Image (spheres, helix red, strand yellow):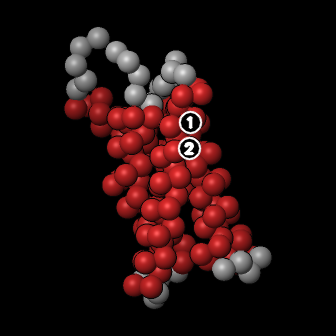
Amino acid sequence: MGPETRFDRLLRFGRALVVGGGATLTDISIFTACVRALGVAPAIARVPALLAGACFQFFGNRSFTFRAAAGSLTRQAKLFLAFEAVAFVLNWATFRVLLEYLAFLPVELVTFVASFLVFVGFAYPMRRHVIFKLPR
């Protein structure tokens, strides 16, 4: 197999966006249900929403985005959990900061912005270069 082309990288990133869209839909659905239907405070509602989105991310990224099902599930799961713990804290902290500065926006939009910033700046690079990287 030759070197990876720019088109291959673009396709992989596109697949990551599809999986991220599904994870975001899961996340936002749980977040909105907690906040709007159950009356849970937004900062607390982020916790179950982020956990559900992370589960969606792991299996979607493993099988679809990075096509890394041939890799060790145990190794990938351990790395994913470690890096997702960091992403979780970054996501929650980013949300809390943005919530103060973007208080005029619906909380669902603020959570989307926070999640996207953490995805681009941290989660995607770690998933691509560490968690789901397969030996050549």
Looking at the rendered structure, the kind of residue marked 1 is Lys
State the quadrant of the C terminus: top left
Q: Residue at x 65, y 73 (%)?
A: 44
Q: Residue furthest right?
A: 38
Q: Which residue is mark 2?
A: 81
Report x, y in % for residue 129: 35, 35
The residue that disc 1 covers is 78
- Which amino acid, mark 2? Leu
Q: Please rate how many residues cluster around mark 2, counting C-alpha atoms within 10 Å: few if below 14, some from 14 to 19, many from 20.
A: some
Residue found 51% across the figure and 49% down from its top = 84
- Image height check: is 27 above or below 100? above
Q: Are marks 1 and 2 in contact (CB under 8 Å)?
A: yes
- Farthest residue to the top: give it: 1
Is any part of residue 133 visible from this angle?
Answer: yes
Viewer-proximal residue among 43 and 36: 43
Q: Secondary structure at mark 2?
A: helix
The residue nearer to you, when weighing 96 against 113, is 96
Spatial distance from mark 1 to mark 2, Cα to Cα? 5 Å
